[in-house]
Image (cartoon, rainbow, N blue to C red):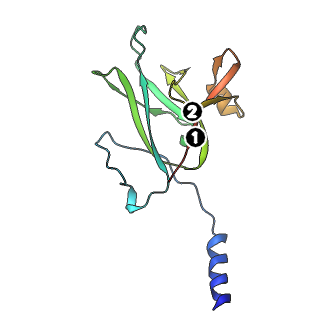
Amino acid sequence: MFDSTFSFMRTKSEKQIRPPEVRVAPRTAHQPGAAWGGQRSGFSKVFRWPVPPEQTPQPTTVEVVGSFSDWRRVPLVYDKPTRTWTTTLTNIQGNHTHRYVVLVDGKPSYDKTCDGLAAPQSSQEEQWQIETPRGPRIMLLFSQTK
């Protein structure tokens, strides 16, 4: 019995696990604990970018790009009453530090809600870096799951 249990566990651990694909959630009310197929394999993150009061003209597009989307642009939707651009990404790989940038009209912009800043390490990060007093930086998202 011990040999069959060990064999089963070894077979399970040898299977390759692909990271889940990040999905953009539709603009509907969020249901806590809801996930595809009843399983939760990642976590959700709401990205918000409020329009600064001094900013004119109003941006026409706001997007987020990062390691969680394989550096593909994900558009944010504008909410006129709150003057905030927002989107919800689901199924983001948990227990991992992601790097990202918010793009305002195609130009990298600082996200006040980021978890930190880091120096760019790859060509994708260098493409989207922002300038800071300490040099070029990328925003960090520390993803954790329960």
Q: Residue 87, image x and y in percent?
A: 40, 35
Q: What residue sits 70% from the left and 28% below the top?
A: 119
* In the depicted structure, whether residue 77 falls above or below residue 142: above
- Nearer the observer, 46 or 63: 46
The local secondary structure at tag 1 comes to: strand
Note whether 132 is above or below 126 in the view shown. Answer: above
Q: How far apart are the two marked residues, 1 and 2, measured between alpha carbons?
A: 6 Å
Q: In this view, does 2 lie to the left or right of 48?
A: right
Q: Are marks 1 and 2 in contact (CB under 8 Å)?
A: yes
In the figure, residue 17 lies in which quadrant?
Answer: bottom right
Direction from residue 32 to residue 105 in the image, left or right: right
Question: Quick one: SS at disc 2?
Answer: loop
Q: Residue furthest front?
A: 146
Name the residue carrying label 1: 142
Q: Kindly identify the amino acid type of the residue bearing the numbered disc 2.
A: Asp
- Residue underneath mark 2: 115
- The residue sitting at 37% across, 23% down in the picture is 84
Total of numbered circles in the picture? 2
